Image (cartoon, rainbow, N blue to C red):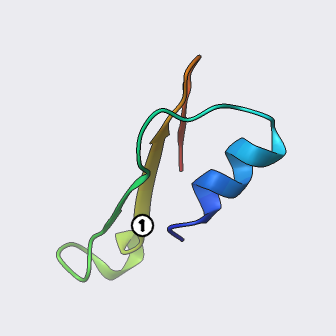
Amino acid sequence: MRTYPYDVASHLDLRTYGDAIVHASNGIGKDENDGFDAFIPLIDSGISL
C-alpha cells in the first residue's frame, strides 16, 4: 500500500513534493469500515485513496 500512490503518480506522469501518508484503522472501528487511507501531495493536485 505504501508504494501504490507513487505508482499511480508515476503512471499519470505527475510530480510529488512530499511523502505518501498511509493510515490503517487496525480494528479501532467497525469491522466493515476497517482498512487503509492514503494521500500523496502532488505539485498540481493530490491523490487520496
Q: Residue furthest top?
A: 44
- Using residue 34 as the reference point, say whether residue 4 is left or right of it: right
Q: Quadrant of residue 43?
A: top right
Image location of residue 46, percent across then percent down: 53, 30
Nearer-the-camera pick, 39 or 35: 39
Q: Where's the N terminus, which quadrant?
A: bottom right
Q: Which residue: 81% across, 38% down? A: 12
Residue 39: percent from the left, percent from the top? 45, 45
The percent coordinates of residue 20 (x first, y second) are 44, 51
Q: Residue 18, how many percent across, how many down? A: 41, 39
Q: Residue at x 55, y 35 (%)?
A: 16
Callout 1: 10 Å neighbours few (<14), some, many (20+)?
few
**Residue 39 vertical position relative to residue 44 in the rendered view, above or below:** below
Q: Helix, strand, or loop for circle 1?
A: strand
Quickly name the residue at label 1.
Answer: 36
Q: Which of 28 and 38 is in front in this view?
A: 38
Q: Which residue type does callout 1 highlight? A: Phe
Q: Name the quadrant containing residue 37.
A: bottom left
Compared to residue 2, the image places residue 47 above or below, namely above
